[in-house]
């Protein structure tokens, strides 16, 4: 199956929220403890304002994932650093879509003068940790027991990739 990456559109809102909520309900990948509403799409758009925000579509034009960069910090001195977020429809993981989205965001980051990408990951999200390690990210920080979900504590793990 072929996948296509394109900029996010407002008509993607319900698909993006549906994908995100899969991870709210069933994993440690998304940090909320209850499903988010459609208004969360506006939150994501605002976070990514001025930064790339993409969806991945299947051949049938079904949105199967999304990815965005956002500022790591509001201070101008941190403008070369961005935080990355992406989620895929669970039935479409393991097909290279995450790698395609990451590659696209890295290229966009370089074009914007960003040379440092950070990912904040739950310590209980082993698949994401391994994905990022395979793509050149290294652990650069860990906040112990800052999250609690599904009756379990988890650490917030920060991973970093230098693009330069």
Image (spheres, rainbow, N blue to C red):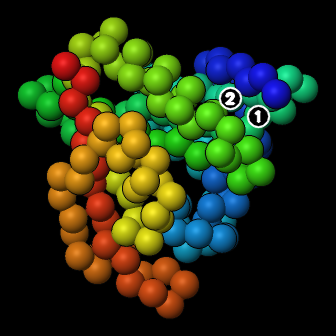
Does residue 17 appear in the picture of this structure?
Answer: no
Position in image of residue 100 (x %, y %): 56, 26
From what the image shows, is residue 83 above or below residue 110? below
Does residue 63 appear in the picture of this structure?
Answer: yes
Toward the left, the furthest residue is 77
Toward the front, the furthest residue is 134
Q: Nearer the viewer, residue 116 or 92?
A: 92
Total numbered circles = 2
Identify the residue at horizontal 63%, vertical 33% (top origin).
97
From what the image shows, is residue 4 above or below residue 149? above
Please report contact status of discs 1 and 2: CB closer than 8 Å, yes or no.
yes
Residue 56, disc: 2
Q: Quadrant of residue 121?
A: bottom left
Position in image of residue 93 (x %, y %): 67, 47
From what the image shows, is residue 110 above or below residue 9? above
Distance, label 1 to label 2, CA atoms, is 6 Å
Toward the top, the furthest residue is 111
Quadrant of the drawing holding the N terminus: top right
Say which element carries label 1: strand
Residue 25, disc: none
Mark closer to the chain start, 1 or 2: 2
Quadrant of the drawing holding the C terminus: top left
Identify the residue at horizontal 65%, vertical 45% (top origin).
94
Say which element carries label 2: strand
Q: Residues within 10 Å of mark 2 (few under 14, many from 20)?
A: many
Toward the bottom, the furthest residue is 151
Q: Residues within 10 Å of mark 1 (few under 14, many from 20)?
A: many
Position in image of residue 27 (x %, y %): 59, 69
The residue pinned by badge 1 equals 63
In this rendering, position of residue 127 left or right of residue 161: right
In this rendering, position of residue 134 left or right of residue 75: right
């Amino acid at each position: 199956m072929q996948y296509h990456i394109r900029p996010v559109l407002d008509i993607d809102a319900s698909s993006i929220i549906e994908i995100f909520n899969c991870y709210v309900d069933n994993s440690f990948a998304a940090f909320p403890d209850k499903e988010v509403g459609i208004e969360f799409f506006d939150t994501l758009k605002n976070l990514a304002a001025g930064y790339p925000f993409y969806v991945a579509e299947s051949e049938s034009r079904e949105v199967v994932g999304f990815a965005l960069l956002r500022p790591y910090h509001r201070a101008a001195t941190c403008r070369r650093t961005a935080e990355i977020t992406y989620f895929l429809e669970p039935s479409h993981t393991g097909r290279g879509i995450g790698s395609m989205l990451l590659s696209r965001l890295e290229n966009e980051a370089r074009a914007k003068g960003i040379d440092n990408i950070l990912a904040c990951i739950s310590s209980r999200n082993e698949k994401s940790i391994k994905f990022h390690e395979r793509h050149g990210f290294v652990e650069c920080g860990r906040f112990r027991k800052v999250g609690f979900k599904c009756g379990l504590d988890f650490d917030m793990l920060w991973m970093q990739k230098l693009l330069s």
